[in-house]
Amino acid sequence: MNLPNGPRYSRWLRLMKFIFTPLEYLEENYQRYGDIVLVERKNKAPFVYISNPEAVKQVFTSPDIVEHSGISSTERSLTSYLFGSNSLVVLDGDRHRQTRKLLMPPFHGDRLNEYSQLIDNITDRVTNNWKIDRPMVVRPIMADISLQVVLQGVFGLNRGKRYDRLKGLISSLLDTLGSPAFNAVIFFAFLRQDWLPFSPWKRFVAIKEEVKQIIYEEIGDRRQELANSSRTDILSLLISAKDENGEGMSDEELHDHLMTLLVVGYETTVTGLCWAVYWIASLPEVRQKLVAELNTVDSKDLDRVAKLPYLNAVCKESLRLYPVALGASPRTLKYPTNIMGYDLPAGAALMPSIYLVHHREDLYPQSKRFIPERFLEREYSPYEYFPFGGGNRRCIGSALAMLEMKLVIANLFAKFELNLSSTEPVKPVRRGETMAPSANLEIVVTGLKEQKKPVLV
Ligand code: HEM
């Protein structure tokens, strides 16, 4: 059998490198073995990283050779436990296709425009008391904005007691999931024990149960309320959605979808926003061009703001250079298949590597530099640029996430002169499944724009 090459050293060392220095691990393998890298697994078909756009296309577009989800049984049990067994991310085949069909409409077309005002209002509220010369840590700010967008746009919750309780719990849940201690829990199933002192698992289980109870309460109340009102948040739309047989979703299904959208959608958007703020605040020429473009439109004409080309290019470049997810979810081969001249066995898990494709010098010259202009000068195919994955598992929240990134960035940089509070270069660090700028990244307001008067502290 003609198999691709790959690292042959111990499984533990590979795992440690992947957990602690994932970018270096991926790049080292790419330098040594090229566009397709095979990693042996104990008692399982191999794992294969792919960074060739033609091969990525084959993986994303061949439903008859590629099973939908190649997540391992360990990951599957953690994901099922966290989201529930009806979650889109653990479903395969027909059920996955049908569930996507039910979940997609609220994330597209006119529905999406309804979120613009919400995102802008929330950003205004969160930045209302910003003061000159006071350094602020970026992550909690972006987390606050994104969580409010999810709670109001997805859950349709109005501010009040339940909103505050859920907001506090979900922040803790996601901080626990993104903590370095929880990284170990993701990769080592034996650490999922609640008798261990200070166990991150124990804390996670307790918060998750409380969140679950609140979600069920909200679903119950909303079902009653919907009989007399028409609402447009995602929960209300999902309650009203019917499948091909005219059946609506059970409470359990609704809970699993909400939990999925919350966890998958929130952490990723926060990280995308933090990177975008970092790049714009650290590169004066990018900031100047962006601000010049923002000045050409009324900052409250959100439709026009969302269509600004340089703003769009800045957000895209940000998701290119450090994609929030290093790879798309792995797909499992149904049959032995030839990819790039290699014979891969049935059962092999194929992972299109977003990070490696986004750093191919033939596609992105000087790939480690932040150059938004590349997206103004060239159109990339969905196999050359895919921060949201692709094929039949492509992120269903991509349009909402891009809209949120653009409107939050536009709002901040149209109102404030923002700089980083330190000139130290920022490194990407693992936060659960995502790569984020280090947690202490700080910005400082150095001036106010528009009619606002500076508030001195
Ligand atoms: C910058 C923000 C985001 C990034 C970079 C991102 C990235 C991704 C990626 C790479 C995948 C895997 C796709 C594949 O395997 O081909 C994915 C799946 C998914 N994303 Fe996102 N995402 C973001 C925001 C969101 C938001 C806001 C939501 C919803 C509120 C969301 C919901 C989902 C869901 C439900 C899936 C699973 C799709 C399936 O399995 O069929 N994501 N996302």
Image (cartoon, rainbow, N blue to C red):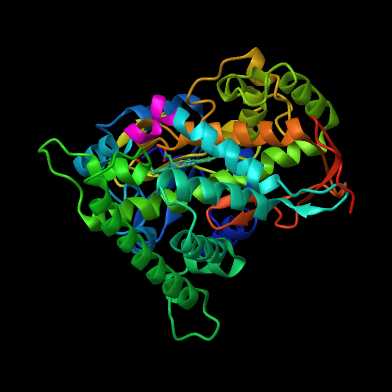
In the displayed structure, 158 sits above or below 183; it is above
| Residue shown at 55% from the left, 44% from the top | 269
Is-magenta flag for residue 356? no
Q: Quadrant of ligand 1?
A: top left
Image side of residue 62 versus residue 415, left or right: left
Which region shows up in magenta?
A: 105-112
In the picture, which quadrant includes the N terminus? Answer: top left
Residue farthest toward the left in the current orientation of the protein: 245
- Give whichever of 315, 14 is nearer the camera: 315
Position of residue 432 measured from the top left corner of the image (x, y, whole percent): 54, 58
- Give the residue displayed 50% in from the left and 20% down from the top: 381
Q: Would residue 111 be counted in the magenta stretch? A: yes
Residue 251 showing in the rendered view: yes
Q: Position of residue 28 (x, y in %)?
A: 64, 45
225 vs 123, nearest the viewer: 225
- The residue positioned 59% from the left and 43% from the top of the image is 122
Magenta span: chief secondary structure: helix
Horizontal and vertical percent position of residue 435: 61, 49
Residue farthest toward the front in the current orientation of the protein: 228
Task: Report the residue at 87% width, 50% height from top.
Answer: 422
Q: Quadrant of residue 355 in the image?
A: top right
Query: Quarter of the image holding residue 154?
Result: top left
Q: Position of residue 128 (x, y in %)?
A: 71, 46
Residue 86 shown left or right of residue 451 in the figure: left
Q: Which quarter of the figure is the C terminus placed in?
A: bottom right
